[in-house]
Image (cartoon, helix red, strand yellow):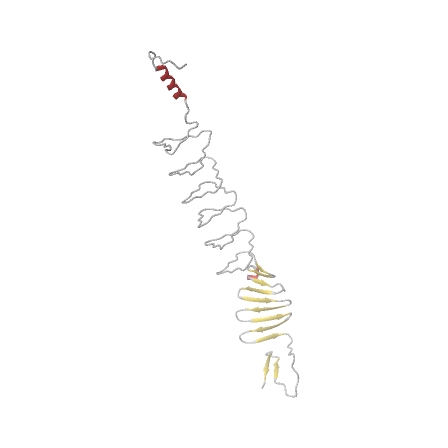
């Protein structure tokens, strides 16, 4: 049996029931937005509490994006334009940077640092610790060694020993101090100054000066044989000089 419409009864009760349903309704709990979209303007804010925001398409942000907390990106992240990071920044996992990169400020690398392409260092460079160089090395310009030694195979260059010295692996070496250059061997030596040069072997020596050549020790001429000719070399015991008479 159909309902009877009492024309003598008003619709006020029905209207209040409809208003009550609108007051307690939550139409956005399962709402969908179509092509028309939603616009929040005039200082309006969308607040998400104890929930999340899922975007399966693309999102466009114009202006300042403020994020407080942890941001997790999974997948490819493309950033174009200037990017500024302030505070601690940690990158876990492989990181690839393609293009020019400028770093201003302090940079600390605590792990292995490997460069497979050309490397250019301009400006002062401090290296503390062990430096290992493999392969050909070209040095253009002066190299200053303030402390320590230079070792090349069995040869040692010591700037602090006797005013500077070079010691060879087989023994002997070269030293220089106060304008004097000394050559040292196994049981012999040589000295070169501004005006003289001397060669020592035990207690014997040969001294060369601008005025004379002095032999200290027995003089032995190997390979000289006597002939029937008269002698033409004379030794003066007073002046201790050898004279040649043609």
The front one of 225 and 216 is 225
Q: Position of residue 43 (x, y in %)?
A: 35, 31
Residue drawn at x 59%, y 75% as measured from the top left: 214
Q: Is residue 158 left or right of residue 106?
A: right
Quadrant for the C terminus in the image = bottom right
When the figure is inspected, residue 185 is found, relative to residue 125, above or below; the finding is below
The front one of 109 and 170 is 109
Extreme residue in the top direction: 8
When the figure is inspected, residue 128 is found, relative to residue 48, above or below; the finding is below
The front one of 112 and 60 is 60
Q: Is residue 52 left or right of residue 176?
A: left
Q: Is residue 64 left or right of residue 135?
A: left
Residue drawn at x 59%, y 82% as measured from the top left: 243
The front one of 26 and 162 is 26
- Location of residue 191 (image quadrant): bottom right
Q: Is residue 220 left or right of residue 146?
A: right
Q: Position of residue 5 (x, y in %)?
A: 36, 14
Q: Position of residue 14 (x, y in %)?
A: 37, 16
When the figure is inspected, residue 138 is found, relative to residue 63, above or below; the finding is below
Q: How many marks?
A: 0
Residue drawn at x 61%, y 70% as measured from the top left: 200
- Location of residue 136 (image quadrant): bottom right
- Location of residue 81 (image quadrant): top left
Quadrant for the N terminus in the image = top left
Q: Position of residue 107 (x, y in %)?
A: 48, 46
């Amino acid at each position: 049996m159909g309902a009877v419409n009492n024309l003598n009864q008003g619709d006020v009760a029905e209207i209040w029931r409809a208003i009550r349903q609108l007051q307690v309704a939550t139409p956005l709990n399962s709402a969908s937005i179509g092509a028309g979209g939603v616009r929040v303007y005039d200082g309006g804010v969308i607040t998400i509490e104890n929930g999340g925001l899922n975007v399966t398409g693309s999102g466009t942000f114009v202006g300042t994006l403020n994020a407080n907390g942890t941001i997790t990106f999974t997948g490819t992240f493309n950033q174009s334009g200037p990017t500024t990071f302030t505070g601690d920044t940690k990158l876990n996992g492989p990181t690839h940077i393609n293009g020019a990169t400028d770093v201003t400020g302090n940079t600390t690398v605590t792990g292995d640092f490997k460069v497979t392409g050309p490397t250019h260092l301009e400006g002062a460079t401090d290296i503390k610790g062990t430096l290992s160089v493999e392969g050909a090395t070209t040095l253009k310009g002066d190299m200053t060694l303030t402390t320590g030694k230079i070792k090349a195979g069995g040869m040692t260059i010591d700037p602090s020993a006797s005013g500077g010295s070079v010691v060879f692996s087989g023994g002997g070496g070269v030293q220089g101090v106060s304008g004097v250059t000394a050559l040292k061997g196994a049981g012999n030596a040589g000295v070169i100054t501004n005006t003289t040069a001397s060669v020592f072997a035990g207690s014997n020596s040969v001294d060369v000066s601008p005025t004379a050549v002095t032999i200290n020790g027995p003089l032995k001429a190997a390979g000289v044989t006597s002939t029937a000719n008269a002698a033409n070399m004379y030794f003066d015991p007073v002046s201790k000089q050898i004279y040649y008479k043609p």
